Image: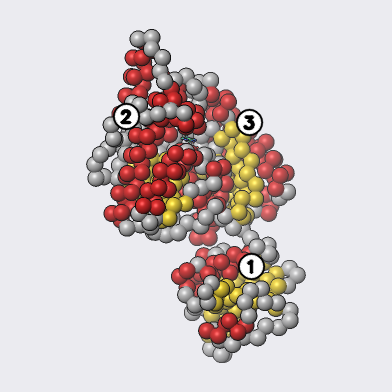
């Protein structure tokens, strides 16, 4: 069956014939750019031929992803001297056999096999007990999360001892829920992934020990994932990362600009010299006695506010670093002073004035880095990337300088295990596995 186009379209490739029981998918834009010719058996797919005109534009990946959607084992043969073996490895294929002198009685062939890769991911670094099953690095089969927000709300922030105890109570419940909802078993998993840094040590340890136990009992490889890598790779669940890229990470613990030339090559080019932006959102909400987490509360208030306070621009310099402690102190003092004088504060205007200056800094520094480093792909990540005003301002700037902006789906912005499963996938393909000495780290350093 010919799925798109006609065999005549393939004139730029060598002539092929397609038998009745075989299929061909032709990829066509203005002209035919590639095709995959395959045999769709009851329980596996065999690739007979795959060719693309230009290896760089992702068409090979498109064709393979199309086949992966059948949810069957995929088999192929490839000349051992062909670079394509690397391409297939990158897409999760494993060498399962070698056929000697297969091509023209001269070159050997590898037989390669792809099986769907399911990663069970665990995230307990802060105040969410979250577990997820991620298929092939980008399909969220199911995510179960128990949030502790209500537990910490009355204290205006996360209480570490309460957090770890609550993870301990929740973790088996979350696993049960995940397995029931996904109708899968731990035996079906290819690996267990867990956040090991940074975060609250006691909380991280609950997830790590649980992951080690599952890895030991079910004999599955163990993968450690950095929380920030998780936030970055959350974007993969919506749109595949395109390199080189610049990632702006904005969360309760981080405000970083990270350059990536390829998977897992992180170069931190700028960071906050003091507080993280999310921390300030939380702090302002706390001094206004509005609850935790502050981000969504302040964002909502700002919708009906005007920038009446007109705070000064922050970090008006040529570095890629940020600072948020000045504006934080400014606002805390302002609220206290007005309280002492018995004056009412216009919370909407204060929230709006804060957002304007806090986000202007993010947009300006990101623009500076994109322009100086000539990077065309921008992603934003982390809890604060849920902020609609931030998204709008970033999109405006990206349009202005012709940069493509990718934002994670709203449900993947704040802490969740799906992002940990997505970030574990390149490590799985690379065979980066841990032994049972794996420990928690509180350090914020990104690898
Ligand atoms: O990524 P995340 O869930 O946890 C950390 O890794 O820190 O980020 C949490 C932070 C909190 O500070 C929260 O107030 C902030 O993200 N946040 C927001 C919004 N939603 C969450 N900040 C601004 N606007 C939002 N809509
Ligand atoms: Zn986070």
| Distance Cα–Cα, label 2 vs label 1 | 55 Å
Secondary structure under badge 1?
helix
**Mark 2 secondary-structure assignment:** loop
Judging by the rendered image, the residue that carries numbered circle 2 is 310
Please rate how many residues cluster around mark 1, counting C-alpha atoms within 10 Å: few if below 14, some from 14 to 19, many from 20. many
Circles 2 and 1, Cβ within 8 Å, touching? The answer is no
Residue beneath disc 3: 169
Residue 160 at x, y percent in the picture: 50, 27
Q: Quadrant of the N terminus?
A: bottom right
Quick one: SS at disc 3?
helix
Looking at the picture, tell me which residue is in the foreground, 107 or 329. Answer: 329
Relative height, residue 161 to residue 140 (above, below): above
Q: Answer with mark 1 or mark 3, whichever residue precedes in sequence.
A: 1
The residue shown at (47%, 69%) is 57
User: Mark 2: few, some, or many residues within 10 Å (few <14, many ≥20)?
Assistant: some
Which residue is labeled 1 in the image?
Answer: 67
The front one of 241 and 345 is 345
The answer to whether residue 407 is left or right of residue 320 is right
Distance from disc 2 to disc 3, alpha carbons, whole Å, reads: 46 Å
Choose mark 2 or mark 1, whichever is in front.
Answer: 2
Please name the residue shown 54% across and 67% down the image: 61
Q: Which mark is residue 227?
A: none
Viewer-nearest of discs 1 and 3: 1
């Amino acid at each position: 069956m010919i799925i798109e186009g006609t065999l005549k379209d393939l004139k730029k490739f060598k002539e092929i014939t397609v038998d009745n029981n075989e299929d061909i998918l032709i990829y066509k834009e203005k002209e035919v750019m590639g095709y995959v010719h395959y045999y769709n058996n009851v329980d596996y797919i065999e690739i007979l031929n795959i060719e693309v005109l230009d290896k760089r534009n992702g068409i090979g990946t498109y064709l393979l992803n199309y086949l992966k959607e059948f949810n069957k084992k995929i088999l192929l043969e490839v000349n051992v001297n062909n670079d394509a073996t690397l391409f297939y490895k990158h897409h999760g294929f494993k060498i399962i056999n070698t056929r000697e002198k297969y091509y023209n009685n001269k070159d050997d062939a590898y037989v390669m096999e792809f099986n769907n890769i399911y990663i069970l991911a665990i995230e307990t670094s802060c105040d969410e007990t979250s577990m997820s099953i991620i298929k092939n690095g980008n399909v969220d089969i199911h995510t179960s999360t128990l949030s502790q927000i209500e537990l910490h709300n009355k204290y205006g922030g996360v209480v570490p001892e309460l957090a770890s105890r609550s993870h301990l109570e929740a973790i088996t419940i979350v696993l049960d829920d995940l397995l029931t909802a996904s109708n899968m078993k731990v035996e079906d998993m290819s690996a267990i992934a867990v956040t090991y840094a940074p975060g609250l040590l006691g909380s991280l340890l609950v997830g790590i020990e649980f992951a080690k136990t599952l890895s030991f009992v079910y004999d599955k490889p163990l993968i450690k994932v950095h929380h920030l890598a998780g936030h970055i790779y959350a974007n993969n669940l919506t749109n595949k990362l395109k390199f080189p890229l610049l990632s702006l990470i904005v969360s309760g613990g981080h405000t970083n600009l990270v350059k990536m030339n390829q998977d897992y090559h992180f170069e931190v080019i700028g960071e906050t010299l003091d507080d993280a932006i999310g921390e300030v959102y939380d702090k302002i909400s706390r001094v206004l006695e509005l609850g935790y987490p502050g981000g969504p509360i302040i964002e909502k208030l700002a919708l009906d506010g005007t920038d009446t306070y007109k705070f000064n621009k922050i970090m008006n310099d040529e570095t890629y670093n940020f600072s948020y402690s000045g504006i934080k102190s400014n606002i805390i003092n302002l609220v206290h002073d007005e309280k002492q004088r018995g004056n009412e504060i216009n919370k909407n205007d204060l929230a709006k004035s804060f957002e304007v200056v806090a986000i202007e800094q993010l947009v300006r520094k990101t623009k500076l880095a994109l322009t100086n480093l000539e990077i065309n792909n921008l992603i934003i990540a982390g809890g604060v990337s849920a902020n609609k005003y931030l998204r709008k301002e970033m999109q405006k700037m990206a349009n202005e300088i012709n940069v493509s902006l990718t934002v994670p789906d709203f449900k993947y912005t704040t802490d969740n295990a799906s992002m940990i499963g997505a970030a574990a996938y390149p490590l799985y393909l690379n065979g980066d596995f841990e032994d049972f000495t794996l420990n928690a780290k509180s350090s914020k350093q990104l690898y």
